[in-house]
Amino acid sequence: MNTLLQDLRYAVRLLRKRPGFTLVAVITLALGIGANTALFTVFEAFALKPLPLKDPQSIVRLSGRNRDGATQPLFSYTDYLDYRDRNNALAGLAAWNKIAVTLGERPLGAGDDLSALSGDYEYIFGQLVSGNYFSVLGAEMTLGRGLLPEEERTPGAVPVVVLSHGFWQRRFDSDPEIIGKSLKLDGQPFTVVGVAGRAFIGTEADAPQFWMPLMMRDQVIGEGGWNYKRWLTERDADAFTLVGRLKPGISRRQAEAEISVIAKQLAEASTDRNRKTHVALSRAATFVEINAELMPLVVPLLVAVGLVLLIACANVANLLLARAATRQKEIAVRLAIGASRRRIIRQLLTESVLLSALGGALGLLLAVWTLSALYPVVMSQLPIPHHLAESFALNLEPDLRVFGFALLASLVSGMAAGLAPALQASRPNLTSALKDEGSTFGAHLSQSRLRNGLVVLQLAVCLALLIGAGLLVRNLQKVETIDTGLETANVFAVIASFETSVPEPQREAELRRQLAARLRNLPGVQAIAQAERQPLTGMPPSAPIALPGQAQTDDRPLRASFNIVSPEYFETLGIRLTRGRSFSEQEAKSNAPVVVISEATARRFWPNAEALGQRIGLNISPLNKADHSEQSPANFPQFEIIGVTRDTRSGWVWQKDETLIYVPLTATFQESGHVGQSLLLRAAGDPQRLMQAARGEAEAIDANLRLRLRRVDDSLAYQMAPFRALAWLAGAMGMLALLLASIGLYGVMSFVVNQRTREIGIRMALGAPQAAVVRMFLLQGLRLTAVGTALGIAGGIGISRLLASVLIDLSPFDPLAFGGVSIFLMSVALLAVFIPARRATRVDPMLALRHE
């Protein structure tokens, strides 16, 4: 310990004597360690930091697997009841799913007029939960109570709600009298029965702002919801996430085995080939559990930040090599008077670890500052309202794990950066070093090779990272400029549903027609259409089809995606017809058996024939009254193809519609009450004024007609957000790597120039022109850069393979990304070489000849 303290004191004195060297080394390591610490902090918040729940280690999340091995994370309500009531391994099992509702302007008292609420609306997200949700998770309440098991028994009978603590504070100013007051959510009054504790957020990072009984699902989701009126009784109506708590002494494996037995018993009693035959239990103590499915997303990010730290370590190693070259006489004297090589190595490693410890401390501060500064910026860039971004409950406060990681990264970095220079410096040529001959023309050849190897390593790693960043930036450009086949500017969707205790499909259809007529007459409306599915909100549904004259097997029945639309749909979204015509209003009213298909559909089903005039069978409810599973393809209703449109990307922007059939929104569909809820309006300018006017028109028609408004461009922006985040993150990593590599190359060339100052003076005294001296150093730098570029391109090829799964219509070997980034790196590298070389030629030859 005394020797260690002596080494530390000596290292501190040396570093204080060279403040420039110390500052550059510490900042270099701080950037590398800080980037890794910041990533680890985010990773810990998602995957390591326990949720603020009672005994979170006993909380598990269920996911199912069917006979084909496909994972199904959602379960039906009947599955939930069977698993809950028939298992003996769980102390409790709860079900939930997400919902979005419109909140009125203020909480209402008992005597307030509910119909008078208008104007100040807010779109909020929450959860429908089973009655035991709060008890299973062990939630504490600030006010009132949680939900009760009896509030799960009768559909629509108990309109109560529990508010989150943050939402209660933000929206209602922490009103202590909130319990018992009524809120209007999507036109339905709900009584507030509780406010959750400050720490309780459930099990998701996007913390819900309220919880309501699962039995209120039909009242808030409405007839446009998935599995409407089926979820209570049908086994395949998967809609809920299941979380449970293990009983004391029961392992996850035991509980998984027991619930899987129940799943197999249920599957044996069902003819559905997609029934779950196995149930897996995963830890729900954190927001996510890192598994094989997430590794393709996590590994490239870990590799990127790890390579940045590698560049920083190589950079500092080169600085230490340069510093060791100037200390050869000191080291030789110590060896000559009896110091062991091991003692010298330990002293040099102490210095490098001290540097890395200082860099780690600064890096930790940089990580904390960067995350606190960038987190609100990143959240503000997401295509969601500001108040929803605020509810994202990611805890990025550093804890002991983060401090431990920063310390470990510092120690590893110090050893990695200092070991090679220490080994090299501890075996000098004692004779030449004691005679001070080592500084005449630079370090030994072996040291030069090591320095050059480290420079090449930095350049190669930097180029590989820049190539990855270039591919992701190019990918973002591709996605942003991709032709979806839709003209979405100034188009917004109006989702209209009717709030009533008894379904009235015919009246609801009539109210939608009235609303469409009123909106059509508003000034500034260019076009209006109705559709079953909004564009850019996920893949459209598919249905079994039958093609006359083409055989079909039972194992792989033909299916095609479809959308039920009004005749104005094509004009509203600018979908161009390439052949034939669209269906008319008269054909829609008369239930004419006609459809329009996409070019991709025509190529797939009629590759060698003209699709126009062909007939196709469609099995879409409510056209068929029989059960779909029993309907024979020969009995599918037949439609004539009257038009072909250009291909679109109406579901996901990164995926073309492989098939798409446009079915007329006929009277039969409208009278069924669950089709055509979405109205699409194209405005002449900014649609904001029309969106406000739409609410007024709905209230004028019927107070129970509720609307949800959404710009189509917002849906597009939501899909772009992951690509934009990846591009920004990769760009930041690439530019950080470039900065470190440039500093490293500049530092090495500055050292080389400084070591060869006397040689430069001799050359210039003998008549060498300045350009020749600069060219000499440029050629040396160019050789290093060329080797680094070649290795970097090879590394970029490996990184491009990791990124291939997220590239959309872009080759992993995109020449612009590879070529442009390589030229850019070489230009920056040569600039880093040119500056010290140019400075050396301006030294007076007489001063250079006297240089020691």
Image (tube, rainbow, N blue to C red):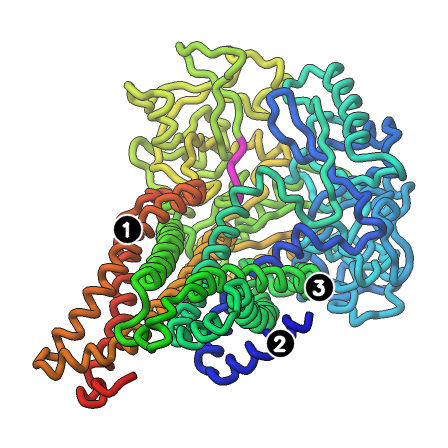
Residue 278 lies, in percent from the top left, at 71, 25
Query: Dot 3: within a 10 Å radius of its alpha carbon, few (fewer than 14), some, or many (20 or more) residues?
Result: few
Q: Which residues are magenta?
A: 537-541
Residue drawn 86% across the image and 46% down it: 158
Q: Secondary structure at mark 2?
A: helix
Which residue lies under the disc numbered 3?
A: 399
Report the amino acid beneath label 3: Asp
Q: Which quadrant would the N terminus be assigned to in this image?
A: bottom right
Residue 643 falls left or right of residue 373: left
Q: Is residue 158 above or below residue 175?
A: above
Residue drawn 14% across the image and 78% down it: 763
User: Most extreme residue toward the left, as rendered?
Assistant: 767
> Which numbered tag is attached to residue 790?
1
> Which numbered tag is attached to residue 6?
2
Report the amino acid beneath label 2: Gln
Query: Dot 2: within a 10 Å radius of its alpha carbon, few (fewer than 14), some, or many (20 or more) residues?
Result: few
Magenta run includes residue 710: no
Q: Secondary structure at mark 1?
A: helix
Q: Are marks 3 and 2 in contact (CB under 8 Å)?
A: no
Q: CA distance from mark 2 to mark 1?
A: 45 Å
Q: Earlier in the sequence, mark 1 or mark 3?
A: 3
User: Most extreme residue toward the front, as rendered?
Assistant: 337
Mark 3 or 2, which is nearer the eye?
Answer: 2
Residue 196 falls left or right of residue 366: right
Q: CA distance from mark 1 to mark 3?
A: 42 Å
Query: Dot 1: within a 10 Å radius of its alpha carbon, few (fewer than 14), some, or many (20 or more) residues?
Result: some
